[in-house]
């Protein structure tokens, strides 16, 4: 397996709380990996550590063979945060073209990113005038426009309708087929089924790292909802 991201014995404290406690995982290149777990389990914190914006106590994260947050990775990672990070006083097109220009990419590349997130019809609208779901997609267009090798997406489909969610997942799958490593957090189990691998976190510990079929098999369950409940209960009893 060609590794894109390697997390080793990672310990992260936020405030006084240990959020990740000796967390390790390996994420293969050119795959879609789903990050799942209850609210507050540490998904965003792990993503922040991978992107290199999280202060860590100990342990290490390497991305494409470089330490997380190091200079060679700046142009190679795209990160979508839960809070949209676009300029409200610019249009969707202006925002996306601005991010494209940082990568010295042409306007046509920005237009492709806008189309990929289904916002062509709203490209001329100010971000301030968009719905919440549209704003989140505008942010996604800016995260993908630089064609990063690693794409870290924190709940990219929240607030989207089922048709758009399906189209966004088709796009993630196409990116992975072209070699992009995609790490996506989600609470939606039908989305988890579309991942190559799943990482299930509970209270900062990894309780499953497998394919969707492997997770179901390990839990003895037919669907992922049940499988996750089983695995979480098992881990709670063992803890
Ligand atoms: N800035 C902060 N200061 C202190 N504690 C924080 C901070 N941000 C998050 N935490 C705590 O860290 C823990 C993990 O938070 P994190 O955002 O990583 O969870 P999550 O799994 O992404 O949750 P969700 O699914 O709700 O987004 C939570 O207990 C949260 O309260």
Image (cartoon, rainbow, N blue to C red):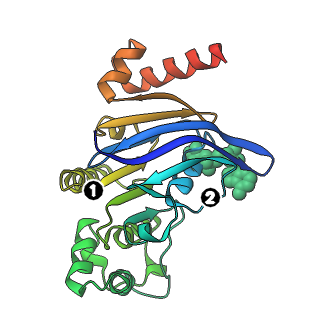
Kindly identify which numbered label has been placed on residue 54: 2
Q: Position of residue 104 (x, y in %)?
A: 30, 86
Badges 1 and 2: C-beta atoms under 8 Å apart?
Answer: no
Please tell me which residue is depicted at 23% across the width and 57% down the height of the picture: 175
Position of residue 18 in the picture relative to residue 138 (left or right) = right
Query: Judging from the image, what secondary structure is the residue with disc 2 in?
Result: loop
Place residue 64 in its image quadrant.
Answer: bottom left
Pick whichever, 137 or 100, lies toward us. 100
- Picture residue at 29% right of the left edge, 72% below the top: 119
Name the image quarter holding the N terminus: top left
User: Mark on residue 180?
Assistant: 1
Whichever of callouts 1 and 2 sits on the residue coming sooner in the sequence is: 2
> Would residue 82 be seen by someone viewing this image from the given angle?
yes
Q: Left or right? Give the position of 88 relative to 121.
A: right
The answer to which of 219 and 52 lies nearer the viewer is 52
Q: Is residue 164 left or right of residue 140?
A: left
CA–CA distance in space, label 1 to label 2:
23 Å
Classify mark 1: residues with Cα within 10 Å, few (<14), some (14-19) or many (20+): many
Residue 155 appears in the picture as rendered: no
Residue 33 is marked as: none
- At 51% from the left and 52% from the top, the residue drawn is 47
Image quadrant in which you'd find residue 49: bottom right
Front position in the image: 1 or 138: 1
Residue 165: % across, % down: 31, 52
Residue in front for this viewpoint, 189 or 73: 73
Q: Secondary structure at mark 1?
A: loop
């Amino acid at each position: 397996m060609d590794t894109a991201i390697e997390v080793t014995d990672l310990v992260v404290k936020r405030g006084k709380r240990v959020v990740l406690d000796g967390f390790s995982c390996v994420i293969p290149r050119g795959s879609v990996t789903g990050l799942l777990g209850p609210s507050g389990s540490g998904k965003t914190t792990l993503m922040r550590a991978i992107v290199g914006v999280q202060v860590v106590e100990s342990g290490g994260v390497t991305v494409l063979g470089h330490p997380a947050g190091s200079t060679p990775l700046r142009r190679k990672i795209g990160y979508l945060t839960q809070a949209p990070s676009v300029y409200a006083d610019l249009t969707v097109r202006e925002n996306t073209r601005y991010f494209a220009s940082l990568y010295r990419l042409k306007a046509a590349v920005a237009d492709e990113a806008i189309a990929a997130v289904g916002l062509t019809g709203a490209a001329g609208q100010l971000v301030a005038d968009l719905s919440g779901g549209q704003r989140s997609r505008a942010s996604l267009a800016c995260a993908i426009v630089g064609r990063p090798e690693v794409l870290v997406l924190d709940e990219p489909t929240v607030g989207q309708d089922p048709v758009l969610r399906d189209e966004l997942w088709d796009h993630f799958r196409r990116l992975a087929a072209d070699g992009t490593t995609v790490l996506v957090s989600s609470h939606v189990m039908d989305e988890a089924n579309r991942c190559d691998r799943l990482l299930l976190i509970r209270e900062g510990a990894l309780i499953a790292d497998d394919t969707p079929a492997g997770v179901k098999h390990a839990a003895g369950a037919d669907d992922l909802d049940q499988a996750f409940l089983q695995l979480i209960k098992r881990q709670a009893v063992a803890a």
